[in-house]
Amino acid sequence: GAQAPAGAVGSVGCASPANWPMEEAAMTEMASLYMDRCDWCGFFVAAPREEPPPPERVGRCQVVDLGGEPEIFPDPVRRSEGNVASNLLPKVAHMLVWLKSQRQLESVGWMCLMETDLYFVPENLRRLVAVLGFSPDEVHWLGQTVLSSMHEEGVMVEPAGSCFSRAALEFGGYLLQQSLSYDRSGGSAGVDVRSMLKFPYGAWQCNLFNQPNMMGYTSMLNSCMRLANVFPTDPRNVHDLQGREYFTLISLDSLGRHYPPPPPGHCSWQHTLPGEDVSTMDSRFFHGTWGFRGKEYLFSPCQRAAAASAPPPPPPPDGG
C-alpha cells in the first residue's frame, strides 16, 4: 500500500544507545541503512575520557554524550568475554529523560528505541499507526510483546525496537526525571519510585539509574512505564491475523532450527533443551525457551507434524 504521509500520523524519531568508540562502525552503518529515514535520529554514548570525543553527528544523526552523568560509567573500549558490567540501563533512562526534555523534539510523534543489533523500517511504523488510527497524543507503547512471564509480570514490551507515542514519552520521561531528582537530592525532591507498586508487581523494581548490568532490562523498564501509566499495547495490534509478529526479534525461519523438538507438548516452558544441559549463556537456550515461551501458537503446527511423524514410544517393561 501507499506510504502514509508523516504529517498524518506524526513524525518518527529513532534513538539508540551505543558504545563509543567500540560501536562506531555499527553507528555509521545504522545511520546510512535506515536511521536516515527517520524524521529525527540520535545516538547516545558515554565516551571514555581517554578516547577521542565522538563527533557531533554520525551521518545526519545527532550524537549525545551522556558521559558527564554520574550514574553512567564510561562505555567499554573493547569487547570482553563472559558477563561484564553494562551501562545500558542508566544510559537508556537518561536517554528517555533527555528526549522528553528537548523542545525541538516536541513535534516528533513517535520515538523508537533502537539498538546496534537490530533493523527497523520507519515506513512500516508510520503505516501501522495510521492503520490502527493511533494518535501521538494518546498513550501508546508499540513493540514485541513478551509473554514469557505472564503469571509474574503480565504482558510486557521488549524495549529494543519499541516505539513510544509522544504522550507516552512525556509520561515515562517525567517519571524517570522524578526518580533521578529523588536519588540526587537524597530524598528531598522528586519521587521515590522504588516504593511504588503497580500490579503485576514483578520481580524488578523501577531502579534503572542504579543498575550496573543488563539483568532485568525488559522487566525493569516495563515496571517503570507501568508506574507512569504507560502500558504495552494490546498484543492484537502488533500481530497479523495468522499470529505473526510485526516486531519480532527472532526470524520465523529459525523456528525449526532452534525450538526444542516435541514431545513434551509444552517444552517451551522448560529452562533447558530436552536431554541437554545447556547454560543460560548458550544461544540455544535463548532461542529455544525464553524467546518463544508463551507463544506456542506460532509453532504448534510444527509440533503436531513432528509428533505425528515420531516413532511410537517403546512398550512399558513387564509388570509396569
Image (spheres, rainbow, N blue to C red):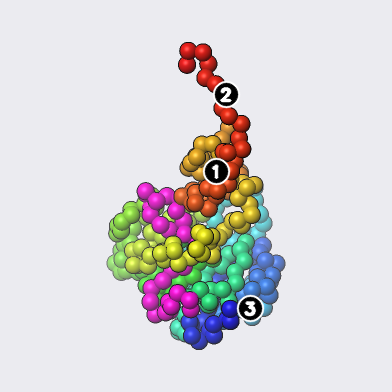
Residue 180: percent from the left, percent from the top?
A: 39, 66
**Amino acid on which the number 2 mark rests in the picture:** Pro
Pick whichever, 120 or 82, lies toward us: 120
CA distance for labels 1 and 3: 44 Å
Q: Is residue 266 above or below residue 208?
A: above
Lower position in the chain sequence, tag 2 or tag 1: 1
| Residue appearing at x 58%, y 32% in the figure | 275
Residue 240 x %, y %: 51, 64
Reading the image, the residue beneath label 3 is 36
Q: Which residues are drawn in magenta?
A: 130-156
Quarter of the picture containing the N terminus is bottom right
Secondary structure at badge 3 equals helix
Residue drawn where x is 43% and y is 58% of the image: 156
Three-letter code for the amino acid on which mark 3 is drawn: Asp
Q: Secondary structure at mark 2?
A: loop
Q: Name the disc covering residue 237, or none.
A: none
Residue designated by label 2: 314
Q: Is residue 129 magenta?
A: no
- Residue 284, how many percent across, how many down? 61, 44
Residue 138 falls inside the magenta stretch? yes
Tell me the SS state at disc 1.
Answer: helix
- Return the residue nearer the eye: 112 or 42: 112
The residue identified by callout 1 is 304
- Mark 2–mark 1 Cα distance, whole angstroms, equals 20 Å
Kind of residue sitting beneath label 1: Arg
